[in-house]
Image: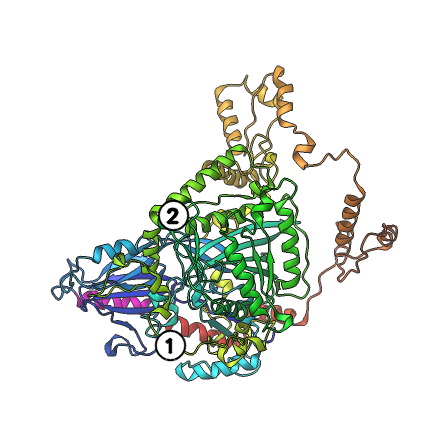
Amino acid sequence: MPAAAAPIISSVQKLVLYETRARYFLVGSNHAETKYHVLKIDRTEPKDLVIIDDRIAGFSNMLVATVWNPFSHVYTQQEVRELLGRLDLGNRTKMGQKGSSGLFRAVSAFGVVGFVRFLEGYYIVLITKRRKMADIGGHAIYKVEDTNMIYIPNDSVRITHPDEARYLRIFQNVDLSSNFYFSYSYDLSHSLQYNLTVLRMPLEMLKSETTQTRQESFDIFEDEGLITQGGSGVFGISSEPYMKYVWNGELLDIIKNTVHRDWLLYIIHGFCGQSKLLIYGRPVYVTLIARRSSKFAGTRFLKRGANCEGDVANEVETEQILCDASVMSFTAGSYSSYVQVRGSVPLYWSQDISTMMPKPPITLDQADPFAHVAALHFDQMLQRFGSPIIILNLVKEREKRKHERILSEELVAAVTYLNQFLPPEHTIIYIPWDMAKYTKSKLCNVLDRLNVIAESVVKKTGFFVNRPDSYCSILRPDEKLFEELYEDHGDTLSLQYGGSQLVHRVKTYRKIAPWTQHSKDIMQTLSRYYSNAFSDADRQDSINLFLGVFHPTEGKPHLWELPTDFYLHHKNTMRLLPTRRSYTYWWTPEVIKHLPLPYDEVICAANLKKLIVKKFHKYEEEIDIHNEFFRPYELSSFDDTFCLAMTSSARDFMPKTVGIDPSPFTVRKPDETGKSVLGNKSNREEAVLQRKTAASAPPPPSEEAVSSSSEDDSGTDREEEGSVSQRSTPVKMTDTGDSTKVTENVVQPMKEVYGINLSDGLSEEDLSIYSRFVQLGQSQHKQDKSSQQLCSRCPDGVIKLTPISAFSQDNIYEVQPPRVDRKSTEIFQAHIQASQGIMQPLGKEDTSMYREYIRNRYL
């Protein structure tokens, strides 16, 4: 890697809102509670929002901030306590009165969603509950579980309006506890490829960026060991979010240029799921992130086509990320990702839902002979993803009456027109495939055909891998982990978009679904029809108000009085557009120059302006992801860690006889199933208890020993009960006549347990795979002559691997002492001398580390 760079971790992760009659004080701290920031919110203004981010001067000389303040004052815990104590004392009704408090603790939170105003004063929206959903390279992704909306102005200055309550109800119809996600250190609005590309910027670029912001800060230790060559400085990088996928951008816009950037917590809407896949015992995290676009967003039938800016309706960007969970680092770990986008056909079209038909007729609203709106849309795609762009069109092509075929014909004409001006190597690839036709056919397997298309697409586009030594393999056809992850993804997005879960599932397309699944499909269709007919209009109003598409204004029509929201989403109907683009050179000039690379990832002046680069000491908390992930300063339970709670291929998709706990220290219960009892909390707690006690439990007695103990006195019985309670699985008492029946229940068929019958002969393919696995294990250790002779007799199909490392043959008779390098020996000798009172002089790095500790703790 050219430079040592790391994402900047937000220092505002825990918030407490304090209240007085005239002010709100929002105190934010990092997770370790070593650094604090304070916001002052005025409550005496009835309709204006006055927010003051505390500067170095403190509260004595505060002014309203009008420019961005990247270096606000950082408090210690003791300073914040003293500040709150002074505020409490100064806001009491009578000086010296101890019975009443002048400062009240209103609410605790984990982030600020934003500020919103309707017809009265401003509200503040806070995240009060969160839940960890995924982990990417040690960077946690949280789901919003609950929020709190607080009115800012005091009741004494509040100017009431009769329609305020209705706007508040419409705004709260957007359930923020339903599939909204955020992260304190990972940019969810960008893809993994973009986030890792930013961290690989050349060293010269990073130095030039830090010189622009260094004059605005003051650090008494900045010149020692940080800027000099060979120092321990690390570049911290934070990028501007891609606002297309940010859903609270309008709510944070009013404070964006006033407060420190750590107060700005951007959230996305869509889906986030993660599962653990074990490959020969090595954990691989499979993460699925779906980002719904906030541009031209809405419900199913009310938002179709595209707006005048090229944003298509209900666009969703889905990214599949694979990472090696055994290495927690963006620089040393292994990551790969693939992105696909789903959206409406980029044309001016709509459907009239006033006819109360299951399939409303499709109407082309505007003629677009030069494919202007499609050109804007594909220009966005080229800028974000590069080339090639591949369109997979699944709409119907053969219909008795033209319905969906209207869109296919117009899309083909638009793509053909745009392609004639693009360079041949960067043309848009169009793949039509009538999925409904192949689904009804009994001769064609839909999923097999889709696999062929997907394989050809991936070969053309490629996928992102951050390491050159990547390995590709085909997934097993019976892998349920991916199937369930994608079905959860489809159900979640379908509920947001269409009002029901998926109508057709993977089992439906495989034609192996039971009859009960077909009845469920019918019920989902009816649910979707009801939602589209009766509740979509209210949901669309809520989305328009939440995203800031509509701003309530005194003296103008209210949101519920508008006959349509067409004019809100198409700005060209309200004002004259600037100069139109060329009909032939329809792309952005800078974008076409760097293809096939996406322009957003090109290192240029325009993209560098979107980055915030700052140099940190390598032990500072803002870039220390190890400290952020493991949190050594707090007590945590091993059984409550996120990596054990997530879906795992070894636990949830194992054979039934293994049970719910994959620990090797747990005695198995043959009557347990893996996933069927996973949701049972008591069973999960029992499994944890088994794992804790199995190691220390005495071995279970034989049947004869248990039978003979029944003849003893009561004291012996109580003692025996105590020993049984310590075992993870009690021994079941049976009669002699039932011994055969017990044996039948315990001893499971080999085919059911392992999936194969080991007594059968192995096929040539299985034998070859096993031989390769043996070769792989042998290559990790030093081979003697006998092993080399064994390798020479291997079949021709076995890959000959050259060992890249060798280890000494330690055994129970002979142990070779490890070799210690010179630096380790010096450290050990210095440690021995320190115990004798002989201290070594401190080095430059140690001095810098100590001063950094003093600065963070006391200054």
Label 2 with label 1: CB-CB less than 8 Å? no
Measuring 85% from the left and 50% from the top, which residue is drawn there?
794
Whether residue 622 is visible here, answered yes or no, is yes
The crowding category of the residue bearing disc 2, from other C-alpha atoms within 10 Å (few below 14, some 14 to 19, many at least 20), is many
- When asked about the image quadrant of residue 176, the answer is bottom left
| Residue wearing tag 1 | 71
Within the magenta stretch, is there residue 87?
A: yes
Whether residue 649 is visible here, answered yes or no, is no
Mark nearer the viewer, 2 or 1: 2
Magenta range: 77-91
Q: Is residue 790 above or below residue 86?
A: above
Residue 725 versus residue 184: which sits nearer the camera?
Answer: 184
- When asked about the image quadrant of residue 542, the answer is bottom left
The residue furthest left is 94
Label placed on residue 532: 2
User: Is residue 176 toward the left or the right of residue 508 in the image?
Assistant: left
Q: Secondary structure at mark 1?
A: loop
Nearer-N-terminus badge (2/1)? 1
Residue 384 versus residue 662: which sits nearer the camera?
Answer: 384
Residue 118 versus residue 323: which sits nearer the camera?
Answer: 118
Which three-letter amino acid code belongs to the residue tagged 1?
Answer: Phe
The residue furthest front is 401
Q: Quadrant of the C terminus?
A: bottom left
Residue 610 versus residue 434: which sits nearer the camera?
Answer: 434
Colour scheme employed for the rendering of this structure: rainbow
Q: Picture coordinates of residue 627 (x, y %)?
A: 48, 63
Q: Picture coordinates of residue 309 (x, y %)?
A: 43, 68
Q: Secondary structure at mark 2?
A: helix
Q: Picture coordinates of residue 631 (x, y %)?
A: 46, 59
Q: How many marks?
A: 2
